[in-house]
Image (cartoon, grey):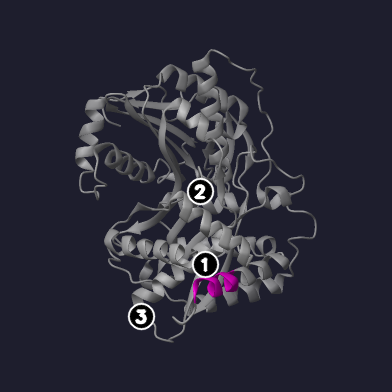
Amino acid sequence: MNPESEQIHHENSTPEETLTHSRFTGGTENSWCRAVMGGTGITVLSLLLSKPMDPTIIQETLQTIMTQSPLLRHKLVWESNSKNPSFSLSSNPSPNFEIIDTSPTLKLLGVLSDQTHLGNFIGDAFHCLLEHELNRNSWCDGLNEKPMNMFFVTLYFLGGSHSILSLRLHTAICDRASAVCILRKILRLVYERESGVIGASETGDVVHEGIEDLIPKGKADKPFWAHGIDLLGYSLGSKRLTNIQFQETKLPRSSQMIRLQMGYEETGRLLAECRRKGVKLCGAIAAAGLMAVSLSKQLHNQCENYAIVTLIDCRKMLEPALHDDNLGFYHSAIMNTISINGEEDLWQLANRFKEALNGTISRNKHFTDMSDVNYLMCKAISCPAFTPYSSLRTSFMVVFEDTLMDDTQDLQEELGVLDYVGCSSVHGVGPSIAVFDTVRNGQLDCACVYPSPLHSRKQMHGLIENMKNILTGASG
């Protein structure tokens, strides 16, 4: 930590703190614990603010959110006598809130000055500090049995009235739906406190089981021999997959981010065309990515296979069904292989993706294959040589089944939120590109995260620019 910054609360347990075991992590949570140690699954939510925000109000807001959300009051504990870490409740939970004043923030930005500039200081700073947060790994030394916090907050002052509020969470307790819930709570609570109207706050006490223990009876049933066949199928299928070109496979990696943004009219036309074609936006995004690869490689009727992973929010499918404000990781991953030859148009590929995805969901493979996918991810982590060039790439792209529709624009304007981005790191095991799509104020905004220097910023900027042009052109 920078010596000029102010640490409101220590990162690890204090002498007077005691921990009470709540439960061990489930299979999916355990997989994320191992992935995060290697650099994939650091979830960051960063807000660019144009109005001064009182740190005391932020501190009180964070305390209220922790009171309402029991998982945020827990620490991650690795125990020598268990293969899975546990969630343990802290007797003295307080936000891990760090304030970095203007001078040390500017020094930090000087260190990060090799980042691609966006044309203005505020935009550059927001982009650089977002990527900085994606690569701050408080969990990389997870097997030392030291209790670890899973929720960190940093307030960077940029000078003048501008500042950046960054939340960093462990993905085992925070999927995208959880991050959206936290964002909405922060906006509402800060607005209430600044307005002098503070509502009652209820204490959340229930820590729900992991996703595997909430799957409806019979939905995840699969004979033992079928697991073996599917694992073999995934393994053999991966040998036939193609990757986009790797730029540098030997150097240490970090996560970088490029945004794909479309205007109001462009977004409206794209969404209308998706409805007319009967495909979801995730299908159009995946298809645009495949077409962009095809353009860069000039396939000319040469067939290649690419893996697309779709993350599905399962909360409403569980038993009991969960709400969006039930924090945790309740997404399931489905991997589909899509063949391209350079002759398809966007909507042909989008339909091909839709049919593949719907077919796997109809067979409950988002539940039956959950343990297989987790096993293969952990196997890739422990044996990188099983992946091409030891790259740890398990797919070309990750998309979310459902697009996030942001309805907090008015509240953001009241609080001076100029911009925000939510995404997760991918420089450990994972895809070549993960797309976190949002439609805010009628405009598409995708945070596209990729591992560097495995892929260069120039390479990915070209790919994402082509994706945007394909999406814009296909929707008229």
For label 1, the SS is strand
The residue singled out by tag 3 in the image is: 298
Q: For residue 265: magenta?
A: no
For label 2, the SS is strand
Single out the residue that lies furthest toward the bottom.
301
Q: Amino acid at mark 1?
A: Ile
The mark that comes first in sequence, 3 or 2, is 3
**Main structural element of the magenta stretch: helix, strand or loop?**
helix
Q: Nearer the viewer, residue 1 or 156?
A: 156
Q: Amino acid at mark 3?
A: Gln
Mark 3 neighbour class, 10 Å CA radius: few under 14, some 14 to 19, many 20 or more: few
118 lies left or right of 448: left
Q: Position of residue 254 (x, y in %)?
A: 33, 53
Query: Which residue does the image show at 62% across and 43% down from the upper left?
Result: 24
The residue singled out by tag 2 in the image is: 438
Question: Between marks 3 and 2, how big is the CA–CA gap?
Answer: 30 Å
Question: Mark 1 and mark 3 in contact (Cβ < 8 Å)?
Answer: no
The residue singled out by tag 1 in the image is: 308
Q: Nearer the viewer, residue 354 or 428?
A: 354
4 lies left or right of 470: left
Question: Mark 2 and mark 1 in contact (Cβ < 8 Å)?
Answer: no
Q: Position of residue 9 (x, y in %)?
A: 42, 23
Query: Which residue does the image show at 55% across and 19% down from the upper left?
Result: 192
Numbered range of the magenta stretch? 345-353
Q: Amino acid at mark 2?
A: Thr
The mark that comes first in sequence, 1 or 2, is 1
